[in-house]
Amino acid sequence: MRAVVQRVSTSSVRCGDVYEEISKGFNVLLGVQKEDTSKDADYMVSKISSLRVFEDDAGKMNLSLKDVDGEILLISQFTLLGDARHGARPSFINAAAYEEGRLLYEYTARSLRENGLRVRTGVYGGDMEVTIVNDGPVTILLDSGKLF
């Protein structure tokens, strides 16, 4: 499982009639790989929940999402699994099949909520318009296989 976590002052997603918006918090772009399991999702939930990238009174990135009463906008993005090392057209063979990916995406959203976080979601597999106002900018890459 791969994620791009961006600290945002605001973020929104639109997909047809569905519109979700958050203020201070994280925009999380999440890609699910073929071999991912709930263990990978649990790793992501733990990392996202505990990331300390919000500034404290001394101006140091020392506070978590819970500490600042932030929100999460969780967006599915299979293109994070794209492999562009060969040629000009990325290969997406490592991305999970639709149903398996959807189930793990929903599991991740549910687990984040069970962890006490406020989570809004995009439409899994939908053609979405995402607006991200990155605060900092602060962007963290996560990979459940600990590749980085």
Image (cartoon, rainbow, N blue to C red):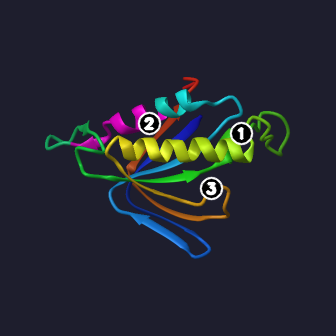
**Residue at which label 3 appears:** 124
**What is the spatial separation of the Cα atoms under label 3 and label 1, in whole angstroms?**
13 Å
Nearest the eye: 99 or 12: 99
For badge 2, the amino acid type reads Val
Q: Is residue 61 left or right of residue 84?
A: left
SS state under label 3: loop
> Which of pointers 2 and 3 lies earlier in the amino acid sequence?
2
The magenta segment = 44-55
Q: Residue at x 67, y 56 (%)?
A: 125
SS state under label 2: helix
Whole-percent x, y for residue 20 in the image: 47, 67
**Residue at which label 2 appears:** 45
Identify the image quadrant of the C terminus: top right
Whole-percent x, y for residue 123 in the image: 59, 60
For badge 1, the amino acid type reads Ala
Identify the image quadrant of the N terminus: top right
> Which of pointers 2 and 1 lies earlier in the amino acid sequence?
2
Q: Is residue 71 left or right of residue 19?
A: left
Whole-percent x, y for residue 99 in the image: 70, 46
Whole-percent x, y for residue 18 in the image: 55, 71
